[in-house]
Image: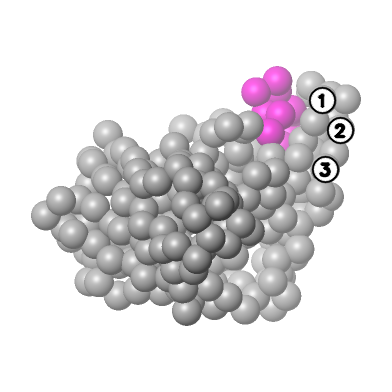
Amino acid sequence: QVTLKESGPVLVKPTETLTLTCTVSGFSLSNARMGVSWIRQPPGKALEWLAHIFSNDEKSYSTSLKSRLTISKDTSKSQVVLTMTNMDPVDTATYYCARGSSILSNWGQGTLVTVSS
Amino acid sequence: DIQMTQSPSSLSASVGDRVTITCRASQGISNSLAWYQQKPGKAPKLLLYAASRLESGVPSRFSGSGSGTDYTLTISSLQPEDFATYYCQQYYSTPLFGQGTKVEIK
C-alpha cells in the first residue's frame, strides 16, 4: 500500500525558511522513473505545483518560485524534503506531497502551514 | 509556461445529470492531461490521465476526451458522491493545474 505523509511546522514567521518532509512507504525513492512532487493549495484556492524530484535526483521547479525552493531526498529514510525561503503570508496554504513527477497518482493528506508574525 | 483555462468555474447539477467540464491549454499538449477530484478537506484524487485513460478503481461514468489544446471531462450520470471540485493538470511541460470547477447540488 502506497502512503505519503507530510510533516513540518504549522506556523512560520514572515521571512523565515519553511522545511517540509514527506515520508513515503509502499514504494522506493530509488525506483527507476518514480518521482515525488510537492503541490500547495491556499485556502479556498486552486492547486499549485511546486517541485518534483526523480529517482536519479533530477529536479524541476515552478518557474515563479524557483529562486525560493529546494527539493532533496534521502532514499535510506524514504523522505523527500522541500525548503522554501523568505516565507510571506501569501504562502499560507496546505502543502501536499504526491507520488509521481507528472501524473500524481497518490497524495498525502496535506499539512496546513500558516505564515504569520 | 503553458497556461490552462478551465470552465466553468462552478456549476449546479442534479443527481443523474450529464456533466461536462472543459480545459483549454494555451498550446498543444499532446494528450498530456490529467483530471483530479477533490472533496472538501481532502487531498485530490487522480481520475484520468493521458486525457482519456481511467485510473484503476475509478467508476466508468467518468470519461475524458480531447486533443491538441481542448480537453473534456464528462460524468455521464452524476452521483451524490461526485459533488466535489475537479481540476485538470497538464504535464506536457512544467506541470500546471487549471483553476478548478466546483460541482454543486442543484
Circles 1 and 2, Cβ within 8 Å, touching? The answer is yes
Tell me whether marks 1 and 3 sit on the same chain: yes
Label 1 to label 3: alpha-carbon separation: 11 Å
In this rendered view, identify the residue nearer to me: A39 or A9: A9
Q: Is residue A107 magenta?
A: no
Name the image quarter holding the N terminus of chain B. Answer: bottom right
**Which contiguous range is marked in magenta?**
B75-84
Say which residue label 1 marks.
Answer: B105
- Chain name for mark 3: B
> Does residue A84 lie above or below A80 as drawn?
below
Q: From this viewpoint, is residue A38 visible?
A: yes
Q: Which residue is mark 3?
A: B10
Tell me, yes or no, whether the two marked residues, 1 and 3, touch with CB atoms within 8 Å.
no
> For numbered disc 3, what is the local secondary structure?
strand
Which residue is rendered at x = 22% and y = 71% of the image?
A56
Residue B5 x %, y %: 76, 63
Contact flag, marks 2 and 3 (Cβ < 8 Å): yes
Mark 1, other Cα within 10 Å: few <14 / some 14–19 / many ≥20? some
The colour scheme used to paint the residues is one colour
Q: From the image, tell me which residue sits under label 2.
A: B12
Query: Residue A25 vs residue A14: left or right?
Result: left
Q: Chain of mark 2?
A: B
- Rendered residue at 50%/55% (across/down): A13
- In the rendered image, which quarter contains the C terminus of chain B? top right
Name the outermost residue toward the left.
Answer: A76
- The kind of residue tagged 3 is Ser
